[in-house]
Amino acid sequence: MLQELPIGFRFSLLHRAFRRKLDEMLGEKELTGVQFGVLASLGRLEAEGRQEISQRDLEQASRLSHANMTDILRRLEKKEFIRCEQSSRDRRFKRVSSTEKAKGLKDEVTRVEQETFSWLTRGLSEAQIEELLAVTDVMLKNAWSDCGKGSEKSDD
């Protein structure tokens, strides 16, 4: 029966299952999976040593539209996970940075991601998991090279 499912529907089911599990695990932090993803992207950009991270940087890293990112950042700022300040380099842009509250989530972020991935891949061998990651790496490169700036909807 599962072999008969259209490939797009398979990815949709996996995506929803991953988001549902993340939302469940993050509920106590009052974060959604989408907000969590933006915080993770911000953390990665900060770890790279970027001095100023703009909303546009986060839109590109997260593949979210400007309107969606604006709403997500507003909510994250209200929850005190981020700070938005005027850029010192360009007054037209806001500089986005993690607060101590968000930085305190770093270990939690890693744990939640790993637990969710382990939950979805239970029953697979290590070799199958390695192959899954290699295949999805190629698929992501293909998708990102063709789609440019994302315009996905969010359920933040």
Image (cartoon, helix red, strand yellow):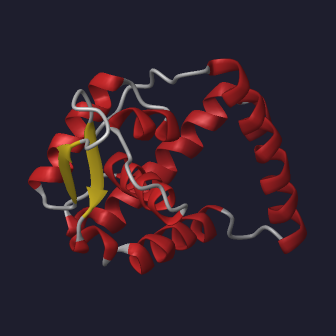
Is 75 on the left-hand or right-hand side of 35?
A: left
Q: Position of residue 125 (x, y in %)?
A: 84, 72
Compared with 154, 120 (above or below) is below
Q: Residue 58's image quarter? A: top left
Front residue of this view, candidates 129 and 57: 57
Front residue of this view, candidates 126 and 152: 152
Viewer can see residue 26: yes
Viewer can see residue 1: no
Is 20 on the left-hand or right-hand side of 47?
A: left
Is 33 on the left-hand or right-hand side of 90?
A: right
Q: Position of residue 33 (x, y in %)?
A: 37, 51
| Image quadrant containing the C terminus | top left
Front residue of this view, candidates 149 and 31: 149
Residue that appears at 49% across and 33% down:
60
Compared with 38, 7 (above or below) is above
Q: Position of residue 134 (x, y in %)?
A: 84, 52
Q: Position of residue 129 (x, y in %)?
A: 80, 64
